[in-house]
Image (spheres, rainbow, N blue to C red):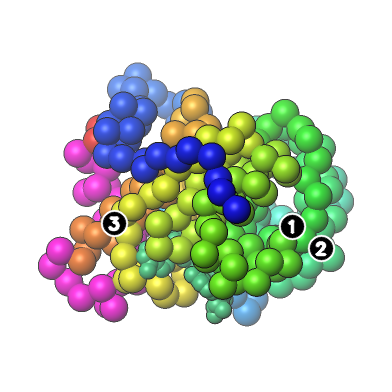
Amino acid sequence: PQESKWQVWTEEHVKRTFQKREQKAHKGTFGTGLLLAGSDEMPGSALLAGIGALRSGIGKLTIGTSRFVAGVLAGRIPEAMYAHDGLQKVVNGQVPKGMKACAIGPGLPNPEEIEQALKVLFQSDLPLIIDAGALQERRYPSRKAEIILTPHPGEFSKMTGIPVPDIQKNRLYFAQKYAQEQGVITVLKGRNTVIAFPDGDLFVNETGNAGLAKGGTGDTLTGMLLAFVSAEKDIKSAVANAVYFHGCSADHWGKTKAQRGLLASDVSELLPDIMKSFE
Ligand code: B4P
Ligand code: MG
């Protein structure tokens, strides 16, 4: 199989597309993001994604999570608001008002509940970032706002039934095919993350290193995507720049420190240094 033409998403692409933070801005300018993540057994995923979103410049963040997790997180992320049992509320049709985009999946264990929540969210006009526990084999409805999927090869295999070794041999081809057939933006993660758009546009990210091969770094990326999609006007560069900066953080770390010592939270902490040279 053969994908159609593709490009590396380069530093020049980032310089051309990354928006300056308007000095007359207020928090509303950058949108409020809804993060549906975290459960009693996996509270850290909501924490990591939440910090990823805030460090990436989101205007306001509402974290929909269990009461227990909200209690744990409130002291660590005082900047966020909390929707207690947020996923259940969405299942019941109560999507918090005034949101610009929604990310769902990190640290969510219950597939049936997620499926019901997605049914409600698909009816909304929110761009959706779907990750981790929310990635399943399913058909996506055609809707106006974008759907962005962020599988690693294991999750992409679960979504498509294609064995991981086959995916890895033809990452560009399968990501492009899936994006076009399903009408969703597909971010196939791993070394040289592939970013495929429904119109056939296809990019490869070359930043990042094996320091990112550690639990939690995917959650950080999901939070970053929520922020960029909420704040930026152009969806393609919003997605590609989030992937680019995520990798840059790991590369920056690797200049002076052992890759193996990188934590997912360090990725977020380094982001302001990375983005500084693009502002
Ligand atoms: P999960 O247990 O579902 O892992 P997770 O919670 O999703 O972890 P996290 O969210 O932190 O990381 P993610 O991969 O989303 O899955 C783990 C299992 O899935 C593994 O045991 C394995 O079976 C399978 N699996 C996962 N990745 C696989 C792969 N690449 N090949 C085959 N099987 C795989 O996000 C990680 C982030 O780090 C991404 O942004 C990714 O692009 C980046 N990253 C990781 N390694 C990198 C590298 N070497 N170079 C550059 N970037 C890298
Ligand atoms: Mg993940």
Instruction: Answer left or right for 39 relative to 137.
Output: left
Location of residue 116 in the rendering, given as x and y in whole percent from the top left corner: 85, 55
**Separation of disc 1 and disc 3 at Cα?**
31 Å
Badge 1 vs badge 3, beta-carbon distance below 8 Å: no
| Figure check: 67 above or below 103 | below
**Tag 2 or tag 3, which sits nearer the N-term?**
2
Looking at the image, which residue is at 54% across and 59% down? 170
Q: Identity of the amino acid at label 2? A: Glu
Residue tagged 3: 249
Quadrant in the picture for residue 107? bottom right
Q: Do we see residue 169 in this rendering?
A: yes
Does residue 260 belong to the magenta stretch? yes
Q: Identity of the amino acid at label 1? A: Leu
**Separation of disc 3 and disc 2 at Cα?**
34 Å
**Tag 3 or tag 1, which sits nearer the N-term?**
1
* Magenta stretch bounds: 255-277
Badge 2 vs badge 1, beta-carbon distance below 8 Å: yes
Nearer-the-camera pick, 162 or 65: 162
Q: Identity of the amino acid at label 3? A: Ser
**Disc nearest the viewer among 3 and 2:** 3
Residue tagged 2: 113
